[in-house]
Amino acid sequence: QLQLQESGPGLVKPSETLSLTCTVSGGSISSSSYYWGWIRQPPGKGLEWIGSIYYSGSTYYNPSLKSRVTISVDTSKNQFSLKLSSVTAADTAVYYCATFNTVTGFDPWGQGTLVTVSS
Amino acid sequence: QSALTQPASVSGSPGQSITISCTGTSSDVGSYNLVSWYQQHPGKAPKLMIYEGSKRPSGVSNRFSGSKSGNTASLTISGLQAEDEADYYCCSYAGSVVFGGGTKLTVL
């Protein structure tokens, strides 16, 4: 069964770029059945979809974040990545990666990783 | 795209049934039956409970059910148990993804 694991720095300075990677195991990221997505959750708040990518490289972003987000896929490493530029304290959140299918939703999810934006 | 509207909190006693609503628009919830529901316990990742409006993934208790009427989707939990106490989020796909604000379920 698919398993996902986020990795990356837990602390990012304001105005810099947040970079995270999600490693997929138990299946191929090149599967035509899924998209691969990023979701975040600020402390004590709700879930916010950041964006999704298909193995072919087609990307879909939350309009509110689109100008700062880049999601890419590396099929050779079975990984996909998130870059969020010009971060502020408002970008402090637990970041989750997840498998996404338009019919079956987000499943499974990674365990999440807390990223704090602070100088 | 605006977030879907959920009540901030609901509560119920063990054995009772509760329903959590998720209101969208004719452009998302109303147009497609692509609503999913997630359960999140504190400090844990969300877990898929319902997809395509009313379908349960393998392993999810049949005490959880989903439905839709117009622009509003609903999650019903019957026979409430202590372990159902968690946050619940709805999610709609309509060309883009939008989540609800979340509902805290308290089992009294």
Image: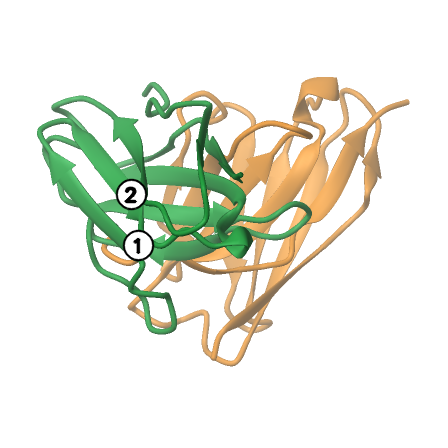
Chain colours: A orange, B green
User: Left of B56 or right of it: where is B54?
Assistant: left
The residue type indicated by label 1 comes to Ile
Residue A118 locus on image (x, y percent):
85, 24
Q: Quadrant of the C terminus of chain A?
A: top right
Q: Quadrant of residue B64?
A: bottom left
Q: State the residue in front, A95 or B69.
A: B69
Q: Does residue B85 lie above or below A5 as drawn? A: above
The residue shown at (49%, 56%) is A98
According to the picture, the residue beneath numbered tag 2 turns out to be B75
Q: Does residue B37 lie above or below A26 as drawn? A: above
The residue type indicated by label 2 comes to Leu
Callout 1 secondary element: strand
Q: Quadrant of residue A106?
A: bottom left
Q: Are marks 1 and 2 in contact (CB under 8 Å)?
A: yes
Label of residue B50 in the image: 1
Q: Is residue A12 visible?
A: yes
